[in-house]
Image: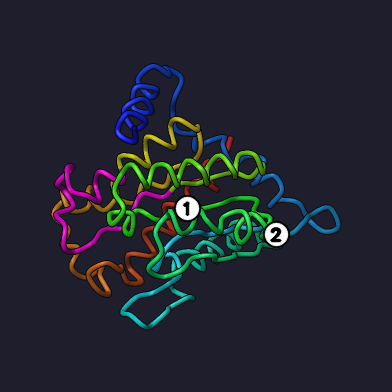
Amino acid sequence: MKKLTFLLSFLFVLIKTDAQIADINTYLKSTTLELQKTWPNNKTMNMVFHGHSVVAGYFLTPTVNTLLAYPHLTLINLKDLYPNAVINVITTAIGGENSEQGQLRFESEVLTKRPDVLFIDYAINDRGIGLIRARAAWVKMIEAAIRYGCKIMLLTPTPVSNETITNNHSPLALQAAQIRELAAIYHVGLVDNFKVFQDMTIAGIDLTSYYAQPVHVNEKGHKIVGDEIKKWFINIK
């Protein structure tokens, strides 16, 4: 039954001709308009980051470098772009967690933070539960967030050193492909970090200096993610 459900959802993508990732130039327009408002017309804008240890800021375990992790770098970037905005960056990530575990606490611990923009990043740990179970958990979170009414940004993973990043059939690459597919089905935002790191490797850049440990990128890796997120807040028409 699970395999049938997965195949049907895949066929749905093929049939749904209007399935496409949200437009980077327009998707967050309502958000950036709010970020441009000044007192007394502005409001606090909540950016909620949900996921695993990378999102939480783990570098070389057990060290947690919150101020160098991409959620905090996003706050810095947004304050540079929108100096008059009141912005909260809220991290609901738990190290070692996969998307099934994250989904179980999604409504009680994530949506209660009243996100204006929600970022989801679980692919590295989702290798342990496989594509079908991960897909079901991501779908539940995405659909709950849509019902809530916030903007949604799905993140493909940062690399891990024990997989060849240019192998599109590796477990992590397959998780990344599924996240792209979900972003298209639900017409939400996509921060395609995996492709960025793939392109860097193809261009001859050695990723060794981007790791704090095999499954955690360091500050250089987090900066790349922060810069990719920033693009969604500046390319606005």
Three-letter residue code for mark 2: Ala
In the rendered image, the residue lying farthest to the bottom is 63
Given residues 191 and 125, the one toward you in this image is 125
Residue 201 is a magenta residue: no
Q: Residues within 10 Å of mark 2 (few under 14, many from 20)?
A: many
Of 30 and 19, nearer the camera is: 19
Where residue 120 is drawn, which disc sits there?
1
Report the side of 221 relative to 44 (left or right). left
From the viewer's perspective, tell me whether residue 108 is left or right of residue 221. Answer: right
Residue tagged 2: 85
Q: Residue 195: x and y, percent?
A: 28, 46
Residue 159 is inside the magenta segment: yes
Residue 174 lies in quadrant: top left
* Quadrant of the snapshot with the N terminus: top left
Which percent across, then down, holds residue 87?
Answer: 66, 62
Is 118 situated above or below 186? Answer: below
* Residue 236 place in picture, x, y as percent: 57, 39
Magenta-tinted stretch? 155-176
Q: Is residue 122 above or below residue 16?
A: below
For label 2, the SS is loop
Counting residues from the start of the chain, the first of labels 2 and 1 encountered is 2
Residue at horizontal 67%, vertical 40%?
A: 30
At mark 1, the secondary structure is strand
In the rendering, at what x and y percent does residue 49 appear?
Answer: 52, 59
Check disc 1: other Cα within 10 Å, few if <14, some if 14-19, many if 20+.
many
Q: Residue at x 18, y 42 (%)?
A: 168
The image shows residue 1, relative to residue 118, as above or below, that is above
Q: Amino acid at mark 1?
A: Ile
